Image (tube, coloured by chain):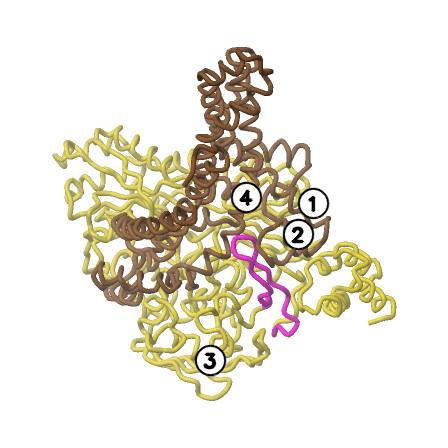
Chain colours: A brown, B yellow
Amino acid sequence: MVRYLGRRVLILLPSLLLVSMLTFVMIRSAGGDPAELRLGLHASPESLARVRREMGLTDPWPVQYVRWLGGALGGDLGRSYLTGSSVTDEILQRFPATLELALSSMLIAVPLGIAAGTISAVRARTVVDNVSMLGGLVGISIPTFWLGVMLIIVFAVWLGWVPVAGSTDVHLGIYPITKFSLIDGFLEDGWDGLWDAARHLVLPAVTLAGWPMAILARHMRSSLLEVLHQDYTRTGRAKGLRFVRLVWRHAFPNALIPVVTVAALETGYLLGGAVITETVFAWPGVGNLTIQALASRDYMLVQGAVLLFAVVFALLNVLADVTYAVLDPRIRY
Amino acid sequence: MDERAALLVQDYRAGRYTRRQFLGKAAALGLGAAALAAVVEAAEGRQVLPLAEAAAAKTLVVGFPDNITNPDPVSPIFGDVKVTNNNINEGIVRWKTGTVTVEPCLARSWDISLDGLTYTFHLRPATFHDGTPVNAQAVVTSYQRQIDEKNPYHFYPMTMTEIVFSNVASVQAVDASTVRITQKRPAVNLLPNLAVFAEGIVSPAALAKYGKDYGTHPTGSGPYGFERWTKGVEFVESAFPQYWGGRPTVDRVIWKTILDNTVRLEQLRTGELDVATQLDFKDVPSLRGDPKLRLVEGNLLDTHYLIMNQAKAPFDKREMRRAVQRAVNKANIGKVAFAGNFTTGAGPCPPGVLGYDPSLAQVYTYDPAAAKALVQQSGAADVPITLLHLTEGFWPQEAQLIQADLQAIGLKVDLQGLDQAALFGKINAGAHQIYLNEWVMDTGDPDDIMFGVFSAPRRKRMGYANVDVDRLNTDAQVERNPDKRKAMYVDAQRRIMSDGPFVTLGYPKTVWGAKAGVTGLMVGPLGDVVIRGVRMA
């Protein structure tokens, strides 16, 4: 296992290098340049040239890339054009909020999605199955921005159960110690603070959970159906195993394996910054930051953020592989 | 601190209360904001105390659709301008709130030499938030860091340098309270230029202390001092007791970036926000009857326009440019895309700026039949046209309305939506035929749009050149008589309109919402949100 993990991490390095190169080229090929955006349309060619030089954009691409890579290897991702601050700081300041939101959503999506998929498979082609799969279809089809705003109108505006947006009550003045709003709320204001943070978290988490929940339910259903039609389950039934036990002990864990991969990928997507949800709920995550960086051609910030997403994705995949071994005794690394 | 407060602090430290309980009890003792501040400082060992003040003091929560990126006055990002300009940082001169009239600020007064070249500013006694004095050297440092690339505080590219300092020969500290600016030519827009957001005076001590991370500790001499900034969450400022103009009445301002218009509005309705800027025009009618809310309306200095590239067919033909001028139904754009919150276009100078002349709207009236005839005369009706526009907000709709108007006179028009970076890239490369955009004034002076768009740095924006317009724009920069100066700008606008490359579509208004008890708030014509004069019931 250790050797396997070591190998996986080694393979990771060239992929990250490739990702960083691709990002570097793509953001520079997107048209427009940061100096033009910064100066607006009235700038003289001399001003533009000066700002380009100050931003280090006048060197050839390979020189710029090697300079960036040199810094990145030492943990320095450069300074954002937009904020003037270190890219590493910018991302680390925002990432906890994204992580908190993504994990909360998956905490909702994984159990519910798997449960719905399991019930659908076990009761395949019944009313329960149809209702559950229709729910899944709705979950996949509803645009997040619409779902988010609807949830706000119903639960925050009409019912007044939760706040409209934000991650804390501004009047509580919660200090960002860990930058996880639940933990900070608890540290600063005890159970009251935790409750306040949770009330802020619930709507964005539910909004974000809709899509992965539906995807997981569909995968779980088809995967479990497949397993239920295999020889060993038939044998199990033939020798008189109770259906519940058969599903729970024999079919379910095997059916879970492909679902784990999907869950890991979905978590990866959410960690890439749930841009729309973060925007709607004014959630202080990296998604928002990345979009802003892209729009303003903040090359340094974009490169740093994409690199972070690539690392997260890769690590989640390793995690999924490790989970297989736990779930399925036949898999050994 | 009285005995009860001391006991309370003891109990809180011993963990007998949660923070909220503690603050509630502290407020219940009837302590004022300042006393409460002292209590919490004693209890928690920190200077700032959020709920404490909220309980006893006036906190204004402002939601706005801009990101805060770097609250250094030299940052040109809208969100940064709002939190800093005339709140944290003040210039030696400033705009009278809600206008673009220059008034004294850190400079009590100034003398202008007879030749108009030398401006001598006399500073008033004032203090930065870090306790250091505002003196002539601080003013010189704040300017020099923009002018001189080698200056140790020139941390990143500073973008207003060209606009503000192109006529400036030198900036000197004559003595501790006197600054002298010498110009290369007697430009009259120096004062408005020095009132621009980027010219807010920054504490040199803070620049030295924080270096490139100054933006995380912005320090000025304005009515509000920086308290804390949780990126992406909130930016908090609190009243500065030593402000030269007297402590402002709102004790604390919390700025929150809320990008989604609907969400910002609902937060205003539920009371999570006290002020929401830039409301969606479609929501405005539903707010008018709400007794809990107030609408704050005003003009941004903003001109929506179409620019035709005279270097490209079919707009190399003047008939074609004039046809477009007559074909676009400006009033309809105001009605449909801005729900009527729109002044129909006259000349490039927007209302509120010297040189605005409503009679210029009569130069080209909406007349599709005449436009059609002009298209026929031009003989270029078959040339396909691509109209470039931005993809956010009202832009696609505005572009579609224009497309329909142009198709109605027989032109073949395609739309191409781009993000700002890509649009600027195309324009600066001269790769456009016609594009739709806006000019948001950087300063309150007509020179900003007149010279900036039509004369100055000769970018390929329009493929436009008119020596008479250039002469008028350049002469107007040094004309001291406002009436003569206005006449020059009106003359220049008429000439530009006669050439026809610039369609002034109109000038959108801006509407903010506030709780009914919030008074004294005014729309800043340059996008500024000045809290100084605001009161809360």
Q: Amino acid at mark 1?
A: Trp
Q: Secondary structure at mark 4?
A: helix
Circle 4 marks a residue in which chain?
A
Residue depth check, mark 3 versus mark 2: number of the one nearer the observer: 2
Crowding near the residue tagged with mark 1, few <14, some 14–19, many ≥20 C-alpha atoms within 10 Å:
some
The answer for how far apart the CA atoms under marks 3 and 2 are is 50 Å
Q: Give the residue number, with chain letter if any, for mark 1.
A: A195
Image quadrant assignment for residue B405: top left
Q: Give the residue number, with chain letter if any, for mark 4.
A: A101
Q: Amino acid at mark 3?
A: Phe
Q: Earlier in the sequence, mark 2 or mark 4?
A: 4
User: Do we see residue B357 in this rendering?
Assistant: no
- In the rendered image, the residue lying farthest to the right is B3
User: Residue A154: x, y in percent?
Assistant: 62, 31
- Both marks 1 and 3 on one chain: no
The answer for how far apart the CA atoms under marks 1 and 3 are is 55 Å
User: Residue B360: x, y in percent?
Assistant: 33, 48
The answer for how far apart the CA atoms under marks 4 and 1 are is 15 Å
Q: Say whether residue B234 is magenta.
A: yes
Residue depth check, mark 1 versus mark 3: number of the one nearer the observer: 1
Circle 1 marks a residue in which chain?
A
Q: Residue at x 44, y 19 (%)?
A: A226
Q: Give the residue number, with chain letter if any, for mark 3.
A: B121
Q: Secondary structure at mark 2?
A: helix
Q: Quadrant of the N terminus of chain A?
A: top left
- Both marks 3 and 2 on one chain: no
> Is B395 placed above or below B144 here?
above
Q: Give the residue number, with chain letter if any, for mark 2.
A: A185
Circle 3 marks a residue in which chain?
B
Q: Nearer the viewer, residue B505 or A105?
A: A105
Would you say B389 lies left or right of B39 here? left
Would you say A152 lies left or right of A297 here? right
